[in-house]
Amino acid sequence: MARKLLLNHVDVPGINGFDVYRQYGGYRAVEKALRTMSPDDVVEEVKKSGLRGRGGAGFPTGMKWGFLAKPEGVPRYLVCNGDESEPGTFKDRYLMTKIPHALVEGMIVSSYALGANTSYIYIRGEMMPQIRIVERAIAEAKAAGFLGKNILGTGYDLEIYVQPGGGAYICGEETALLESLEGKRGNPRIKPPFPAVAGLYGCPTVVNNVESIAATVPIINEGGEEYAKIGIERSTGTKLISASGNIVRPGVYEIELGLPVEEFIYSDEYCGGIANGKRLKAVVAGGSSVPILPANLALKTAKGDARLMTYESLADGGFVTGTAMGSGGFIAFDEDQCIVRNTLNFTRFYHHESCGQCSPCREGTGWMEKVLHKIEYGHGDLSDIDLLWDIQRKIDGNTICPLGDASAWPVASAIRHFRDEFEWHIFHPEEAQTRNYGLAHYADPLIMAE
Amino acid sequence: MLKVQENMIVEFSAPLLERFAEVVARYPEGRHKSALLPILHLVQAEYGWLSVDAMDKVAAYLGIQPIEVYEVATFYTMFFLQPKGKYVLEVCRTGPCCLVGAERIMKHIETRLGVKEGEVTADGMFSWRGVECIAACGFGPVLQIGPEYTFYENLTENSVDKLIEELRHKAETN
Protein backbone atom coordinates (compact mmCIF):
# COMPACT_ATOMS: atom_id res chain seq x y z
CA MET A 1 0.00 0.00 0.00
CA ALA A 2 1.32 3.42 -0.93
CA ARG A 3 1.75 6.04 1.77
CA LYS A 4 -1.02 8.56 2.11
CA LEU A 5 -0.47 11.94 3.70
CA LEU A 6 -3.61 13.85 2.70
CA LEU A 7 -6.26 11.18 2.36
CA ASN A 8 -5.07 8.75 5.07
CA HIS A 9 -8.20 9.26 7.18
CA VAL A 10 -10.58 10.07 4.36
CA ASP A 11 -12.91 7.15 5.11
CA VAL A 12 -13.24 7.84 8.82
CA PRO A 13 -16.86 8.77 9.57
CA GLY A 14 -17.16 12.39 10.71
CA ILE A 15 -13.65 13.36 9.58
CA ASN A 16 -15.22 16.42 7.91
CA GLY A 17 -16.01 17.77 11.40
CA PHE A 18 -13.57 19.38 13.82
CA ASP A 19 -13.75 16.86 16.67
CA VAL A 20 -12.98 13.74 14.67
CA TYR A 21 -10.33 15.55 12.63
CA ARG A 22 -8.69 16.66 15.88
CA GLN A 23 -8.88 13.11 17.30
CA TYR A 24 -6.96 11.89 14.30
CA GLY A 25 -4.12 14.30 14.90
CA GLY A 26 -5.64 17.40 13.32
CA TYR A 27 -4.26 20.87 14.13
CA ARG A 28 -1.01 19.41 15.50
CA ALA A 29 0.78 21.25 12.69
CA VAL A 30 -0.71 24.54 13.85
CA GLU A 31 0.38 23.89 17.43
CA LYS A 32 3.85 22.88 16.33
CA ALA A 33 4.35 25.79 13.93
CA LEU A 34 2.94 28.56 16.11
CA ARG A 35 4.48 27.36 19.38
CA THR A 36 7.87 26.01 18.37
CA MET A 37 8.77 27.51 14.99
CA SER A 38 9.38 30.97 13.62
CA PRO A 39 7.61 31.91 10.36
CA ASP A 40 10.94 31.58 8.55
CA ASP A 41 11.41 28.08 10.01
CA VAL A 42 8.10 27.08 8.41
CA VAL A 43 9.16 28.52 5.06
CA GLU A 44 12.47 26.67 5.38
CA GLU A 45 10.70 23.38 6.11
CA VAL A 46 8.49 23.77 3.04
CA LYS A 47 11.56 24.58 0.93
CA LYS A 48 13.25 21.39 2.20
CA SER A 49 10.18 19.33 1.35
CA GLY A 50 10.57 20.12 -2.34
CA LEU A 51 6.79 20.61 -2.58
CA ARG A 52 5.80 21.89 -6.01
CA GLY A 53 2.61 23.81 -6.74
CA ARG A 54 -0.19 21.30 -7.19
CA GLY A 55 -2.41 23.60 -9.25
CA GLY A 56 -0.70 22.96 -12.57
CA ALA A 57 2.45 24.99 -13.02
CA GLY A 58 4.52 22.89 -10.59
CA PHE A 59 6.54 25.84 -9.30
CA PRO A 60 8.31 25.09 -5.98
CA THR A 61 6.04 26.36 -3.22
CA GLY A 62 8.82 27.23 -0.76
CA MET A 63 10.60 29.29 -3.40
CA LYS A 64 7.34 31.13 -4.21
CA TRP A 65 6.99 31.93 -0.52
CA GLY A 66 10.59 33.13 -0.42
CA PHE A 67 9.82 35.74 -3.10
CA LEU A 68 7.18 37.45 -0.95
CA ALA A 69 8.10 41.08 -0.42
CA LYS A 70 7.91 42.28 3.17
CA PRO A 71 7.79 46.07 3.25
CA GLU A 72 7.15 47.61 6.68
CA GLY A 73 3.57 48.48 7.50
CA VAL A 74 2.00 46.87 4.43
CA PRO A 75 -0.34 43.89 4.96
CA ARG A 76 0.51 40.62 3.22
CA TYR A 77 -2.06 38.18 1.96
CA LEU A 78 -2.36 34.46 1.39
CA VAL A 79 -5.01 33.57 -1.17
CA CYS A 80 -5.96 29.96 -1.72
CA ASN A 81 -6.85 29.04 -5.27
CA GLY A 82 -9.88 26.78 -5.11
CA ASP A 83 -11.17 27.75 -8.54
CA GLU A 84 -10.56 24.21 -9.79
CA SER A 85 -11.85 24.33 -13.38
CA GLU A 86 -9.27 22.51 -15.48
CA PRO A 87 -11.21 19.83 -17.38
CA GLY A 88 -10.32 16.47 -15.88
CA THR A 89 -9.50 17.86 -12.44
CA PHE A 90 -11.73 17.38 -9.40
CA LYS A 91 -9.31 16.66 -6.57
CA ASP A 92 -9.75 19.96 -4.73
CA ARG A 93 -13.51 19.56 -4.67
CA TYR A 94 -12.96 16.08 -3.22
CA LEU A 95 -10.47 17.28 -0.61
CA MET A 96 -12.67 20.18 0.48
CA THR A 97 -15.72 17.93 0.69
CA LYS A 98 -14.09 15.11 2.60
CA ILE A 99 -11.46 16.79 4.79
CA PRO A 100 -12.11 20.54 4.83
CA HIS A 101 -10.07 20.94 8.00
CA ALA A 102 -6.92 19.82 6.17
CA LEU A 103 -7.29 22.96 4.06
CA VAL A 104 -8.12 25.20 7.02
CA GLU A 105 -5.18 23.83 9.03
CA GLY A 106 -2.87 24.31 6.05
CA MET A 107 -4.16 27.86 5.64
CA ILE A 108 -3.30 28.69 9.24
CA VAL A 109 0.21 27.21 8.98
CA SER A 110 0.86 28.89 5.62
CA SER A 111 -0.57 32.26 6.68
CA TYR A 112 1.65 32.17 9.75
CA ALA A 113 4.70 31.42 7.60
CA LEU A 114 3.92 34.37 5.34
CA GLY A 115 2.92 36.78 8.08
CA ALA A 116 -0.62 37.18 6.74
CA ASN A 117 -3.37 38.20 9.14
CA THR A 118 -6.22 38.01 6.65
CA SER A 119 -6.43 35.17 4.14
CA TYR A 120 -8.96 34.30 1.51
CA ILE A 121 -10.00 30.97 0.05
CA TYR A 122 -11.35 31.63 -3.45
CA ILE A 123 -13.67 28.75 -4.37
CA ARG A 124 -15.46 28.57 -7.68
CA GLY A 125 -19.08 29.64 -7.33
CA GLU A 126 -20.52 26.37 -8.59
CA MET A 127 -19.02 24.62 -5.59
CA MET A 128 -21.65 26.12 -3.30
CA PRO A 129 -21.82 22.91 -1.20
CA GLN A 130 -18.03 23.02 -0.72
CA ILE A 131 -18.18 26.74 0.13
CA ARG A 132 -20.64 25.90 2.91
CA ILE A 133 -18.47 22.99 4.12
CA VAL A 134 -15.29 25.08 4.25
CA GLU A 135 -17.10 27.99 5.91
CA ARG A 136 -18.36 25.61 8.57
CA ALA A 137 -14.86 24.22 9.10
CA ILE A 138 -13.51 27.76 9.52
CA ALA A 139 -16.21 28.53 12.10
CA GLU A 140 -15.38 25.31 13.99
CA ALA A 141 -11.66 26.08 13.98
CA LYS A 142 -12.38 29.58 15.23
CA ALA A 143 -14.62 28.30 18.01
CA ALA A 144 -11.78 25.99 19.08
CA GLY A 145 -9.33 28.88 19.26
CA PHE A 146 -7.30 28.05 16.14
CA LEU A 147 -8.42 31.22 14.36
CA GLY A 148 -9.16 34.78 15.40
CA LYS A 149 -7.19 36.92 17.80
CA ASN A 150 -4.16 35.67 19.73
CA ILE A 151 -4.30 32.07 18.45
CA LEU A 152 -3.21 29.56 21.15
CA GLY A 153 -1.99 32.49 23.19
CA THR A 154 0.90 33.06 20.79
CA GLY A 155 -0.11 36.59 19.83
CA TYR A 156 -0.73 35.63 16.22
CA ASP A 157 -4.02 36.88 14.71
CA LEU A 158 -5.66 35.39 11.64
CA GLU A 159 -9.03 35.56 9.92
CA ILE A 160 -9.90 33.38 6.94
CA TYR A 161 -12.77 34.17 4.56
CA VAL A 162 -14.24 32.22 1.68
CA GLN A 163 -14.83 34.09 -1.57
CA PRO A 164 -17.10 32.56 -4.22
CA GLY A 165 -16.15 32.89 -7.87
CA GLY A 166 -18.66 33.38 -10.66
CA GLY A 167 -17.97 30.54 -13.07
CA ALA A 168 -14.90 31.44 -15.10
CA TYR A 169 -12.02 29.08 -15.91
CA ILE A 170 -9.70 32.05 -16.31
CA CYS A 171 -9.96 32.83 -12.58
CA GLY A 172 -7.75 29.82 -11.91
CA GLU A 173 -4.93 31.99 -13.28
CA GLU A 174 -3.57 33.71 -10.19
CA THR A 175 -3.73 37.33 -11.31
CA ALA A 176 -7.21 36.85 -12.82
CA LEU A 177 -8.22 35.33 -9.50
CA LEU A 178 -6.95 38.42 -7.68
CA GLU A 179 -8.87 40.70 -10.05
CA SER A 180 -11.99 38.64 -9.40
CA LEU A 181 -11.40 38.80 -5.64
CA GLU A 182 -11.27 42.58 -5.99
CA GLY A 183 -14.74 42.49 -7.54
CA LYS A 184 -13.73 42.85 -11.17
CA ARG A 185 -13.78 40.84 -14.38
CA GLY A 186 -11.26 38.03 -14.35
CA ASN A 187 -8.77 39.57 -16.74
CA PRO A 188 -5.21 38.38 -16.04
CA ARG A 189 -2.71 41.11 -15.21
CA ILE A 190 0.49 41.77 -17.05
CA LYS A 191 3.48 40.49 -15.08
CA PRO A 192 5.69 41.87 -13.66
CA PRO A 193 4.86 43.01 -11.08
CA PHE A 194 4.27 39.53 -9.72
CA PRO A 195 1.72 39.01 -6.93
CA ALA A 196 4.61 38.44 -4.50
CA VAL A 197 5.30 42.16 -4.87
CA ALA A 198 1.91 43.62 -5.85
CA GLY A 199 -1.00 41.21 -5.56
CA LEU A 200 -4.30 41.61 -3.77
CA TYR A 201 -5.10 45.33 -3.27
CA GLY A 202 -1.57 46.05 -4.51
CA CYS A 203 -0.07 44.29 -1.49
CA PRO A 204 2.43 41.38 -1.46
CA THR A 205 0.40 38.20 -1.98
CA VAL A 206 0.97 34.48 -2.34
CA VAL A 207 -1.58 32.44 -4.30
CA ASN A 208 -1.44 28.68 -3.69
CA ASN A 209 -3.59 25.77 -4.80
CA VAL A 210 -5.84 23.97 -2.28
CA GLU A 211 -3.76 20.79 -2.42
CA SER A 212 -0.45 22.65 -2.00
CA ILE A 213 -1.77 24.36 1.11
CA ALA A 214 -3.12 21.11 2.55
CA ALA A 215 0.27 19.47 1.89
CA THR A 216 1.98 21.88 4.29
CA VAL A 217 0.27 20.06 7.18
CA PRO A 218 2.13 16.72 6.80
CA ILE A 219 5.27 18.69 5.91
CA ILE A 220 5.21 20.49 9.25
CA ASN A 221 4.14 17.39 11.19
CA GLU A 222 6.76 15.08 9.75
CA GLY A 223 9.41 17.55 8.62
CA GLY A 224 10.37 18.66 5.14
CA GLU A 225 13.15 16.12 4.81
CA GLU A 226 10.85 13.23 5.67
CA TYR A 227 8.35 14.47 3.04
CA ALA A 228 11.09 14.74 0.45
CA LYS A 229 12.00 11.07 0.94
CA ILE A 230 8.81 10.13 -0.88
CA GLY A 231 9.01 10.40 -4.64
CA ILE A 232 11.79 10.61 -7.17
CA GLU A 233 14.24 13.44 -7.87
CA ARG A 234 12.47 16.81 -7.90
CA SER A 235 9.04 15.18 -7.70
CA THR A 236 8.66 14.77 -3.96
CA GLY A 237 5.78 13.71 -1.80
CA THR A 238 2.33 12.54 -2.72
CA LYS A 239 -0.06 13.94 -5.28
CA LEU A 240 -3.80 13.75 -5.70
CA ILE A 241 -4.72 12.45 -9.13
CA SER A 242 -8.23 12.90 -10.53
CA ALA A 243 -8.92 9.91 -12.75
CA SER A 244 -11.72 10.10 -15.30
CA GLY A 245 -12.72 8.85 -18.72
CA ASN A 246 -13.13 5.27 -19.81
CA ILE A 247 -11.70 3.50 -16.76
CA VAL A 248 -13.19 0.97 -14.37
CA ARG A 249 -12.74 3.00 -11.20
CA PRO A 250 -12.81 6.76 -11.76
CA GLY A 251 -12.12 8.90 -8.72
CA VAL A 252 -9.47 10.74 -6.74
CA TYR A 253 -6.34 8.81 -5.79
CA GLU A 254 -3.41 9.88 -3.67
CA ILE A 255 -0.25 8.47 -5.21
CA GLU A 256 3.38 8.56 -4.23
CA LEU A 257 5.08 10.44 -7.05
CA GLY A 258 7.07 7.95 -9.10
CA LEU A 259 4.26 5.46 -9.64
CA PRO A 260 4.43 4.00 -13.18
CA VAL A 261 1.60 5.26 -15.42
CA GLU A 262 0.89 1.68 -16.45
CA GLU A 263 0.37 0.61 -12.85
CA PHE A 264 -1.86 3.62 -12.21
CA ILE A 265 -4.12 2.72 -15.13
CA TYR A 266 -4.27 -1.04 -14.75
CA SER A 267 -3.82 -1.72 -11.03
CA ASP A 268 -6.98 -2.43 -9.02
CA GLU A 269 -5.68 -0.12 -6.34
CA TYR A 270 -6.17 2.78 -8.76
CA CYS A 271 -8.06 3.00 -12.08
CA GLY A 272 -8.60 -0.74 -12.41
CA GLY A 273 -8.01 -0.83 -16.16
CA ILE A 274 -10.05 0.29 -19.14
CA ALA A 275 -13.83 -0.07 -18.78
CA ASN A 276 -15.90 -2.60 -20.73
CA GLY A 277 -12.86 -4.65 -21.72
CA LYS A 278 -11.80 -2.03 -24.26
CA ARG A 279 -8.28 -1.02 -25.17
CA LEU A 280 -6.55 2.21 -24.19
CA LYS A 281 -6.21 4.65 -27.06
CA ALA A 282 -4.90 7.86 -25.55
CA VAL A 283 -4.20 9.62 -22.28
CA VAL A 284 -4.39 13.23 -21.15
CA ALA A 285 -2.23 13.04 -18.05
CA GLY A 286 -2.55 16.44 -16.41
CA GLY A 287 -5.80 18.18 -17.30
CA SER A 288 -7.10 19.20 -20.72
CA SER A 289 -4.32 21.73 -21.29
CA VAL A 290 -1.43 19.29 -21.43
CA PRO A 291 -0.56 17.46 -24.64
CA ILE A 292 -2.57 14.32 -25.34
CA LEU A 293 -0.46 11.18 -25.78
CA PRO A 294 -1.26 8.00 -27.69
CA ALA A 295 -1.33 4.92 -25.45
CA ASN A 296 2.16 3.73 -26.39
CA LEU A 297 3.79 7.05 -25.48
CA ALA A 298 1.71 7.38 -22.33
CA LEU A 299 3.00 4.10 -20.95
CA LYS A 300 6.58 4.36 -22.21
CA THR A 301 8.82 7.27 -23.10
CA ALA A 302 10.23 7.53 -26.62
CA LYS A 303 13.44 6.02 -25.26
CA GLY A 304 11.48 2.98 -24.14
CA ASP A 305 11.63 3.60 -20.38
CA ALA A 306 8.54 3.12 -18.27
CA ARG A 307 6.68 6.43 -18.01
CA LEU A 308 6.31 7.46 -14.36
CA MET A 309 3.93 9.81 -12.63
CA THR A 310 6.55 12.47 -11.91
CA TYR A 311 6.97 15.99 -13.23
CA GLU A 312 10.16 14.91 -15.02
CA SER A 313 9.08 11.59 -16.51
CA LEU A 314 5.76 12.89 -17.84
CA ALA A 315 7.66 15.74 -19.48
CA ASP A 316 10.30 13.40 -20.90
CA GLY A 317 10.59 14.05 -24.63
CA GLY A 318 9.32 17.61 -24.30
CA PHE A 319 6.11 18.31 -26.16
CA VAL A 320 7.25 16.15 -29.08
CA THR A 321 6.84 12.80 -27.33
CA GLY A 322 6.04 13.85 -23.78
CA THR A 323 3.42 15.79 -21.88
CA ALA A 324 3.17 17.39 -18.40
CA MET A 325 1.96 16.65 -14.89
CA GLY A 326 -0.25 19.75 -14.89
CA SER A 327 -2.98 19.58 -12.29
CA GLY A 328 -3.07 15.79 -12.17
CA GLY A 329 -6.29 15.54 -14.18
CA PHE A 330 -5.82 12.09 -15.67
CA ILE A 331 -8.23 11.35 -18.54
CA ALA A 332 -8.16 7.95 -20.25
CA PHE A 333 -9.65 7.47 -23.73
CA ASP A 334 -10.71 4.03 -24.96
CA GLU A 335 -10.55 2.76 -28.53
CA ASP A 336 -14.05 4.07 -29.34
CA GLN A 337 -13.23 7.72 -28.71
CA CYS A 338 -12.74 10.20 -31.53
CA ILE A 339 -9.69 12.39 -31.14
CA VAL A 340 -10.99 15.05 -33.54
CA ARG A 341 -14.27 15.31 -31.65
CA ASN A 342 -12.46 15.56 -28.32
CA THR A 343 -10.09 18.21 -29.65
CA LEU A 344 -13.10 20.16 -30.92
CA ASN A 345 -14.69 19.85 -27.48
CA PHE A 346 -11.59 21.10 -25.66
CA THR A 347 -11.11 23.94 -28.16
CA ARG A 348 -14.72 25.04 -27.73
CA PHE A 349 -14.01 25.09 -24.01
CA TYR A 350 -11.01 27.41 -24.42
CA HIS A 351 -12.91 29.63 -26.84
CA HIS A 352 -15.74 29.91 -24.32
CA GLU A 353 -13.35 30.62 -21.44
CA SER A 354 -10.98 33.07 -23.15
CA CYS A 355 -11.27 36.40 -21.32
CA GLY A 356 -10.84 38.27 -24.59
CA GLN A 357 -7.92 40.51 -23.64
CA CYS A 358 -5.33 39.18 -26.10
CA SER A 359 -6.25 38.86 -29.76
CA PRO A 360 -4.27 35.66 -30.47
CA CYS A 361 -6.31 33.83 -27.84
CA ARG A 362 -9.66 35.60 -28.34
CA GLU A 363 -9.64 35.18 -32.12
CA GLY A 364 -7.43 32.10 -32.40
CA THR A 365 -9.45 29.84 -30.12
CA GLY A 366 -12.66 30.66 -32.01
CA TRP A 367 -10.96 30.15 -35.34
CA MET A 368 -9.57 26.76 -34.30
CA GLU A 369 -13.01 25.74 -33.05
CA LYS A 370 -14.55 26.58 -36.44
CA VAL A 371 -11.90 24.68 -38.37
CA LEU A 372 -12.18 21.65 -36.09
CA HIS A 373 -15.97 21.75 -36.38
CA LYS A 374 -15.61 21.75 -40.14
CA ILE A 375 -13.34 18.69 -40.07
CA GLU A 376 -15.40 16.78 -37.52
CA TYR A 377 -18.62 17.30 -39.49
CA GLY A 378 -17.16 16.15 -42.79
CA HIS A 379 -16.42 19.43 -44.58
CA GLY A 380 -12.67 19.61 -44.03
CA ASP A 381 -9.84 20.05 -46.51
CA LEU A 382 -6.35 18.71 -46.08
CA SER A 383 -5.07 22.28 -45.84
CA ASP A 384 -7.22 22.76 -42.72
CA ILE A 385 -4.81 20.60 -40.74
CA ASP A 386 -1.94 22.90 -41.68
CA LEU A 387 -4.14 25.89 -40.92
CA LEU A 388 -4.85 24.55 -37.42
CA TRP A 389 -1.15 23.96 -36.90
CA ASP A 390 -0.43 27.49 -38.00
CA ILE A 391 -3.04 29.07 -35.72
CA GLN A 392 -2.02 27.17 -32.60
CA ARG A 393 1.62 28.06 -33.22
CA LYS A 394 0.71 31.74 -33.37
CA ILE A 395 -1.27 31.61 -30.12
CA ASP A 396 1.35 29.67 -28.15
CA GLY A 397 3.51 32.05 -26.14
CA ASN A 398 1.86 35.20 -27.46
CA THR A 399 -0.66 35.94 -24.73
CA ILE A 400 -0.59 37.58 -21.30
CA CYS A 401 -1.56 34.41 -19.46
CA PRO A 402 -1.16 30.68 -20.11
CA LEU A 403 -4.76 30.15 -21.32
CA GLY A 404 -3.55 30.82 -24.84
CA ASP A 405 -0.83 28.19 -24.55
CA ALA A 406 -3.29 25.82 -22.92
CA SER A 407 -5.60 26.12 -25.92
CA ALA A 408 -2.75 25.56 -28.38
CA TRP A 409 -1.18 22.46 -26.83
CA PRO A 410 -4.14 20.06 -27.12
CA VAL A 411 -4.55 20.98 -30.80
CA ALA A 412 -0.83 20.69 -31.54
CA SER A 413 -0.50 17.34 -29.79
CA ALA A 414 -3.64 15.90 -31.38
CA ILE A 415 -2.28 16.73 -34.85
CA ARG A 416 1.21 15.60 -33.92
CA HIS A 417 0.14 12.16 -32.73
CA PHE A 418 -3.15 11.55 -34.52
CA ARG A 419 -2.71 13.27 -37.86
CA ASP A 420 -3.89 10.12 -39.63
CA GLU A 421 -7.23 10.37 -37.82
CA PHE A 422 -7.68 13.98 -38.96
CA GLU A 423 -6.86 12.92 -42.53
CA TRP A 424 -9.31 10.04 -42.34
CA HIS A 425 -12.07 12.52 -41.41
CA ILE A 426 -11.17 14.55 -44.49
CA PHE A 427 -10.90 11.65 -46.93
CA HIS A 428 -13.94 9.78 -45.60
CA PRO A 429 -16.35 12.55 -44.61
CA GLU A 430 -19.46 10.38 -44.73
CA GLU A 431 -18.01 7.37 -42.99
CA ALA A 432 -16.67 9.69 -40.28
CA GLN A 433 -20.25 10.68 -39.46
CA THR A 434 -21.30 7.10 -38.79
CA ARG A 435 -18.33 5.52 -37.03
CA ASN A 436 -15.17 6.39 -35.21
CA TYR A 437 -11.66 5.83 -36.42
CA GLY A 438 -10.75 3.36 -33.70
CA LEU A 439 -7.24 2.49 -32.64
CA ALA A 440 -4.79 4.30 -34.84
CA HIS A 441 -1.69 3.35 -36.67
CA TYR A 442 -0.14 6.26 -34.91
CA ALA A 443 1.59 8.90 -36.92
CA ASP A 444 5.30 9.07 -36.36
CA PRO A 445 5.58 11.62 -33.55
CA LEU A 446 8.90 12.90 -34.81
CA ILE A 447 7.68 13.94 -38.26
CA MET A 448 5.61 16.81 -36.95
CA ALA A 449 8.30 18.14 -34.65
CA GLU A 450 9.01 21.79 -35.18
CA MET B 1 -23.50 42.66 -24.87
CA LEU B 2 -26.15 43.51 -22.32
CA LYS B 3 -29.43 42.51 -23.90
CA VAL B 4 -32.31 43.71 -21.79
CA GLN B 5 -35.52 41.82 -22.45
CA GLU B 6 -37.31 42.72 -19.30
CA ASN B 7 -36.61 44.48 -16.09
CA MET B 8 -37.72 43.64 -12.58
CA ILE B 9 -37.94 46.26 -9.89
CA VAL B 10 -36.61 44.89 -6.63
CA GLU B 11 -36.36 46.07 -3.08
CA PHE B 12 -33.75 44.35 -0.94
CA SER B 13 -35.24 43.06 2.30
CA ALA B 14 -33.72 43.82 5.70
CA PRO B 15 -32.38 40.26 6.17
CA LEU B 16 -30.79 40.39 2.72
CA LEU B 17 -29.16 43.75 3.50
CA GLU B 18 -27.86 42.24 6.71
CA ARG B 19 -26.17 39.50 4.73
CA PHE B 20 -24.69 42.14 2.38
CA ALA B 21 -23.18 43.84 5.43
CA GLU B 22 -21.72 40.55 6.67
CA VAL B 23 -20.00 40.09 3.31
CA VAL B 24 -18.65 43.66 3.18
CA ALA B 25 -17.06 43.17 6.62
CA ARG B 26 -14.70 40.52 5.19
CA TYR B 27 -12.56 43.06 3.35
CA PRO B 28 -10.24 45.84 4.45
CA GLU B 29 -11.62 49.35 4.62
CA GLY B 30 -12.18 50.91 1.22
CA ARG B 31 -12.04 47.50 -0.51
CA HIS B 32 -15.75 46.79 -0.34
CA LYS B 33 -15.97 46.34 -4.10
CA SER B 34 -14.62 42.85 -3.36
CA ALA B 35 -18.10 42.09 -2.05
CA LEU B 36 -19.58 42.41 -5.53
CA LEU B 37 -19.53 38.75 -6.58
CA PRO B 38 -20.80 37.35 -3.27
CA ILE B 39 -23.57 39.97 -3.22
CA LEU B 40 -24.62 39.21 -6.79
CA HIS B 41 -24.86 35.53 -5.79
CA LEU B 42 -27.11 36.48 -2.86
CA VAL B 43 -29.30 38.63 -5.11
CA GLN B 44 -29.61 35.89 -7.73
CA ALA B 45 -30.44 33.29 -5.07
CA GLU B 46 -33.21 35.61 -3.86
CA TYR B 47 -34.75 36.63 -7.20
CA GLY B 48 -33.63 33.89 -9.60
CA TRP B 49 -31.83 36.30 -11.93
CA LEU B 50 -30.18 39.73 -12.04
CA SER B 51 -32.38 42.45 -13.47
CA VAL B 52 -30.92 45.81 -14.43
CA ASP B 53 -32.73 47.39 -11.51
CA ALA B 54 -31.24 44.83 -9.11
CA MET B 55 -27.76 45.50 -10.49
CA ASP B 56 -28.26 49.26 -10.22
CA LYS B 57 -29.29 48.88 -6.60
CA VAL B 58 -26.25 46.72 -5.87
CA ALA B 59 -24.11 49.47 -7.42
CA ALA B 60 -25.80 52.07 -5.23
CA TYR B 61 -25.30 49.89 -2.15
CA LEU B 62 -21.57 49.49 -2.82
CA GLY B 63 -21.13 53.08 -4.00
CA ILE B 64 -19.78 52.05 -7.40
CA GLN B 65 -20.91 52.82 -10.95
CA PRO B 66 -23.63 50.60 -12.48
CA ILE B 67 -21.25 49.75 -15.33
CA GLU B 68 -18.89 48.16 -12.81
CA VAL B 69 -21.68 45.77 -11.89
CA TYR B 70 -22.80 45.11 -15.49
CA GLU B 71 -19.28 44.30 -16.66
CA VAL B 72 -18.89 41.74 -13.91
CA ALA B 73 -22.37 40.23 -14.28
CA THR B 74 -21.83 39.75 -18.02
CA PHE B 75 -18.35 38.26 -17.59
CA TYR B 76 -19.18 35.39 -15.23
CA THR B 77 -21.32 32.59 -16.62
CA MET B 78 -23.17 31.86 -13.39
CA PHE B 79 -25.14 35.10 -13.49
CA PHE B 80 -28.46 35.09 -15.35
CA LEU B 81 -29.42 38.38 -16.97
CA GLN B 82 -32.88 37.25 -17.90
CA PRO B 83 -35.52 35.14 -16.17
CA LYS B 84 -34.95 31.39 -16.14
CA GLY B 85 -37.04 28.40 -15.17
CA LYS B 86 -37.48 27.66 -11.49
CA TYR B 87 -34.99 24.84 -11.92
CA VAL B 88 -32.06 25.30 -14.28
CA LEU B 89 -30.51 21.96 -15.17
CA GLU B 90 -26.87 22.67 -15.99
CA VAL B 91 -25.22 19.70 -17.67
CA CYS B 92 -21.45 19.50 -17.97
CA ARG B 93 -20.55 19.36 -21.66
CA THR B 94 -16.75 19.29 -21.46
CA GLY B 95 -14.43 16.48 -22.64
CA PRO B 96 -14.32 13.98 -19.77
CA CYS B 97 -18.09 14.01 -19.32
CA CYS B 98 -18.56 13.60 -23.07
CA LEU B 99 -16.40 10.45 -22.96
CA VAL B 100 -19.07 8.90 -20.78
CA GLY B 101 -22.20 10.15 -22.54
CA ALA B 102 -22.93 13.80 -21.63
CA GLU B 103 -24.06 14.62 -25.19
CA ARG B 104 -26.63 11.83 -25.05
CA ILE B 105 -27.93 13.14 -21.72
CA MET B 106 -28.28 16.69 -23.07
CA LYS B 107 -30.21 15.43 -26.08
CA HIS B 108 -32.46 13.45 -23.74
CA ILE B 109 -33.15 16.48 -21.54
CA GLU B 110 -33.95 18.57 -24.61
CA THR B 111 -36.47 15.99 -25.79
CA ARG B 112 -37.90 15.40 -22.34
CA LEU B 113 -38.44 19.07 -21.51
CA GLY B 114 -39.35 20.00 -25.09
CA VAL B 115 -37.31 23.21 -24.99
CA LYS B 116 -34.00 24.15 -26.54
CA GLU B 117 -30.92 25.09 -24.55
CA GLY B 118 -31.50 28.36 -22.67
CA GLU B 119 -35.30 28.39 -23.16
CA VAL B 120 -37.90 28.09 -20.40
CA THR B 121 -40.69 25.48 -20.34
CA ALA B 122 -44.23 26.87 -20.76
CA ASP B 123 -45.02 26.30 -17.08
CA GLY B 124 -41.95 28.32 -16.09
CA MET B 125 -40.59 25.30 -14.24
CA PHE B 126 -37.48 24.26 -16.15
CA SER B 127 -34.56 25.54 -18.20
CA TRP B 128 -31.46 23.65 -19.16
CA ARG B 129 -28.08 24.48 -20.59
CA GLY B 130 -24.69 22.96 -21.18
CA VAL B 131 -21.95 24.36 -18.97
CA GLU B 132 -18.20 23.93 -19.05
CA CYS B 133 -16.34 21.57 -16.74
CA ILE B 134 -17.74 21.67 -13.20
CA ALA B 135 -14.94 19.64 -11.61
CA ALA B 136 -16.74 16.33 -11.18
CA CYS B 137 -15.17 14.48 -14.13
CA GLY B 138 -14.91 11.16 -12.31
CA PHE B 139 -18.64 10.99 -11.76
CA GLY B 140 -19.89 12.00 -15.20
CA PRO B 141 -22.25 12.65 -16.76
CA VAL B 142 -23.18 15.26 -14.15
CA LEU B 143 -25.60 18.13 -13.79
CA GLN B 144 -26.03 20.82 -11.16
CA ILE B 145 -29.01 22.88 -10.05
CA GLY B 146 -28.66 26.29 -8.43
CA PRO B 147 -28.87 28.27 -6.24
CA GLU B 148 -27.35 25.64 -3.94
CA TYR B 149 -25.68 23.86 -6.85
CA THR B 150 -26.77 20.41 -5.81
CA PHE B 151 -25.01 17.70 -7.77
CA TYR B 152 -26.50 14.79 -9.65
CA GLU B 153 -23.87 12.31 -10.74
CA ASN B 154 -23.48 9.29 -13.02
CA LEU B 155 -26.60 10.32 -14.94
CA THR B 156 -28.59 7.95 -17.09
CA GLU B 157 -31.74 8.65 -19.11
CA ASN B 158 -33.72 6.99 -16.30
CA SER B 159 -32.16 8.97 -13.49
CA VAL B 160 -32.78 12.21 -15.40
CA ASP B 161 -36.46 11.30 -15.88
CA LYS B 162 -36.75 10.53 -12.19
CA LEU B 163 -35.07 13.79 -11.22
CA ILE B 164 -37.40 15.86 -13.41
CA GLU B 165 -40.42 14.09 -11.90
CA GLU B 166 -39.14 14.70 -8.37
CA LEU B 167 -38.54 18.38 -9.02
CA ARG B 168 -41.97 18.79 -10.57
CA HIS B 169 -43.52 17.07 -7.59
CA LYS B 170 -41.52 19.21 -5.16
CA ALA B 171 -42.65 22.40 -6.88
CA GLU B 172 -46.29 21.31 -6.88
CA THR B 173 -46.38 20.36 -3.22
CA ASN B 174 -44.64 23.54 -2.08
Image (cartoon, coloured by chain):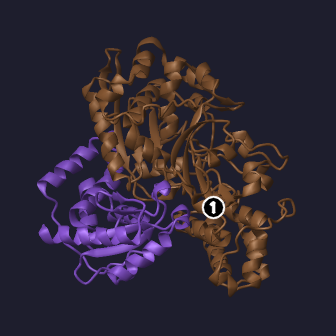
Count of marks, rendered view: 1
The answer to whether A255 appears left or right of B69 in the picture is right
Q: Residue at x 59, y 68 (%)?
A: A362
Res A404 → quadrant: bottom right
Query: Where residue B143 sits: x, y (%)?
Result: 39, 64
Classify A118 as above or below B76.
Answer: above
Q: Residue at x 41, y 52 (%)?
A: A124
Classify A183 as above or below A148.
Answer: below
The answer to whether A69 appears left or right of A258 in the picture is left
Classify A396 as above or below A312.
Answer: below
Q: Name the outermost residue toward the right.
A: A447
Which chain is in brown here? A
**Amino acid under disc 1:** Phe
Q: Residue at x 41, y 20 (%)?
A: A28
Asked whether residue B51 is in view, the answer is no
Query: Where residue A381 sits: x, y (%)?
Result: 76, 83
Query: Where residue B97 sits: x, y (%)?
Result: 51, 63
The answer to whether B61 appears left or right of A421 in the picture is left
Q: Which residue is mark 1?
A: A333
Asked whether residue B103 is in view, the answer is yes
Which part of the image, by quadrant, shows the C terminus of chain A? bottom right
